[in-house]
Amino acid sequence: MAQGEAVRDFRKLTEHRTDVGEDGAAYQMPSPKSGDLMQVIVSNGGGWDHVSVSLKHRCPNWIEMEYVKRMFFYERETAMQLHVAHNEHINCHPNCLHIWRPQNEPIPLPPGWMVA
């Protein structure tokens, strides 16, 4: 996404929405794989788009995270999951994963042949 381009307004996505606030919204939606209920919280404050995905008894899997990414980010957008340094790691929920995207700068990517 180019700098200055409008970001998706998560509050306008109403299917499965349970709450909405100034900087984001909360959703409960079935997993596309298992049907388990996923809790999804989205926000776009502080220069970042952020989505957290959790399930009651396990972490989300790749299929679920990809489904959520496609729901809350445009197809042309790159978003990321982060593995921070050990001393910066905070685990507030053992079954929660996050997707991030900076709003005002591109995410550096390796060459395409390395990602295949």
Image (cartoon, helix red, strand yellow):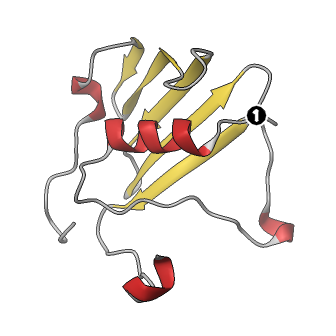
Few, some or many C-alpha atoms within 10 Å of disc 1 (few <14, some 14-19, many ≥20)? some
For the N terminus, the image quarter is bottom left
| Numbered label tally | 1
Q: Is residue 16 above or below residue 1?
A: above
Q: Is residue 45 above or below residue 17?
A: below
For residue 31, which quarter of the picture?
Answer: top right
Residue 48, image x, y percentages: 41, 56
**Left or right of residue 25: residue 34:** right
Determine the residue positioned at 61% across, 20% down.
Answer: 34
Which residue is label 1 attached to? 95
Q: Residue furthest left?
A: 5
Q: Is residue 18 above or below residue 54?
A: above
Q: Is residue 1 above or below residue 20?
A: below
Determine the residue positioned at 49% across, 41% down.
Answer: 51
**Left or right of residue 16: residue 64:** right
What amino acid is at disc 1?
A: Asn
Residue 8, image x, y percentages: 22, 43
**Which of the two residues, 51 or 4, is positioned nearer the viewer here?**
51
Residue 21, image x, y percentages: 37, 23
Residue 69, image x, y percentages: 41, 44
**Left or right of residue 93: residue 29:** left
Determine the residue positioned at 62% across, 63% down.
Answer: 82
* Helix, strand or loop status at disc 1: loop
**Left or right of residue 52: residue 48:** left
